[in-house]
Image: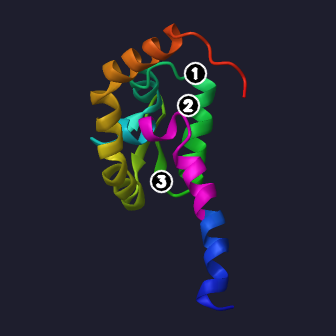
């Protein structure tokens, strides 16, 4: 197979990966791991609005994809911590500007949505 023939396959595979890391919660969890290992309860507390089940699903998915590691600490009582892998750290670096942009534009986006929603509904085409 030539390089040209494999490009559509790579594009499809990239779309799958983008879907995983671009879901509603993954990048927020990655951002919350920026300062080092965190316990589940810390991640739950710092990821506003996420349910326990959704955090579990997100962490498992990120672990499966090699973005983070899960470590069980053999202490009493036992606890689990999560930490970005080297690949996860590169994801964090790559997405930090997008997350920063999102945070700095929240008020403008809210205002634009309110303006749009306040206008008369457009007629169907």
User: Is residue 22 at all visible to an observer of this figure?
Assistant: yes
Q: Residue at x 50, y 18 (%)?
A: 49
Q: Earlier in the sequence, mark 3 or mark 2?
A: 2
Please, is residue 87 above or below residue 84 in the view?
Answer: below
**Disc 3 to disc 2: CB gap under 8 Å:** no
Q: Which residue is mark 1?
A: 51
Q: Is 63 a magenta residue?
A: no
* Structural distance between the alpha carbons of marks 2 and 1: 6 Å
Q: Residue at x 52, y 12 (%)?
A: 117
Front position in the image: 58 or 73: 58
Q: Position of residue 31 (x, y in %)?
A: 36, 39
Left or right of 110? Residue 70 is right
Q: Which mark is residue 67?
A: 3
Q: Tell me the quadrant of the picture where the N terminus can be found.
A: bottom right
**Disc 2 to disc 1: CB gap under 8 Å:** yes
Left or right of 106? Residue 28 is right
Left or right of 8? Residue 91 is left
Left or right of 29? Residue 56 is right
* Structural distance between the alpha carbons of marks 1 and 3: 20 Å
Within the image, what quadrant is residue 125 found in? Answer: top right
Q: Residue at x 61, y 85 (%)?
A: 4
Q: Which residues are magenta?
A: 14-28
Q: Which residue is mark 2?
A: 55
Front position in the image: 62 or 75: 62
């Amino acid at each position: 197979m030539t390089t040209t023939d494999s490009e559509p396959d790579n594009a499809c595979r990239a779309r799958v990966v983008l879907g995983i890391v671009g879901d509603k919660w993954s990048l927020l969890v990655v951002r919350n791991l920026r300062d080092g290992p965190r316990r589940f309860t810390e991640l739950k507390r710092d990821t506003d609005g996420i349910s326990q089940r959704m955090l579990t699903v997100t962490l498992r998915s990120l672990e499966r994809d090699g973005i983070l590691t899960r470590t069980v600490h053999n202490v009493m009582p036992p606890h689990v911590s999560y930490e970005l892998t080297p690949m996860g750290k590169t994801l964090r670096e790559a997405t930090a500007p997008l997350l920063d942009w999102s945070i700095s534009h929240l008020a403008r986006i809210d205002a634009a949505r309110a303006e749009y929603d306040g206008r008369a509904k457009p007629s169907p085409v």
